[in-house]
Image (cartoon, rainbow, N blue to C red):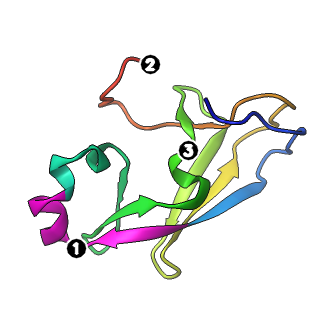
Amino acid sequence: PTQPASQSIPAHTVIEFSPVLLFTKQEYEEHGRHTLLDHYTFSWRDGRMALALGLGSLFNHSSSPNVSYTTDSREDRIRYTTTRLVDQDEELCIFYGHKLWFEP
């Protein structure tokens, strides 16, 4: 499990800027999509696929997440922001989508 929040965090607080590892469309089609990386990548605006580094790959899934993300293709990073007040000791979670490879 991930580390819970060490203190309460106000809504709309940026909590992480994760750098990304980018794969060309060809690299991803030939290799990446055939590995576990397929479940952890983000579609990039120009057709490449991105793997979040830093804390970006550590957030667990929730159908009612307290963290949202936006991709920043200009800076090649992903910004994670709280969607509401997060209480101390609450886990930070994002929404992974509807086609999950695991049981929530």
Residue that appears at 48% across and 76% down: 76
Is 22 magenta? The answer is: yes
Measured along the vertical axis of the image, is residue 19 above or below residue 100? below
Is 56 magenta? The answer is: no
Q: Quadrant of residue 70?
A: bottom right
Q: Mark 3 — residue?
A: 58
**Horizontal side of residue 52 vs 29, given as left or right:** right
Residue that appears at 39% across and 36% down: 97
Residue that appears at 85% across and 31% down: 87
Q: Quadrant of residue 64?
A: top right
x and y percentages locating residue 5 in the rendered image = 80, 37
Q: Mark 2 — residue?
A: 104
**Separation of marks 1 and 3 at Cα, in angstroms:** 23 Å
The residue segment tinted magenta is 19-31
Q: Mark 1 — residue?
A: 24
Q: Residues within 10 Å of mark 1 (few under 14, many from 20)?
A: some
Work out which quarter of the rendered image holds the N terminus and state it.
Answer: top right
Q: Earlier in the sequence, mark 3 or mark 2?
A: 3
- Looking at the rendered image, the disc whose residue lies closer to the viewer, 3 or 2, is 3
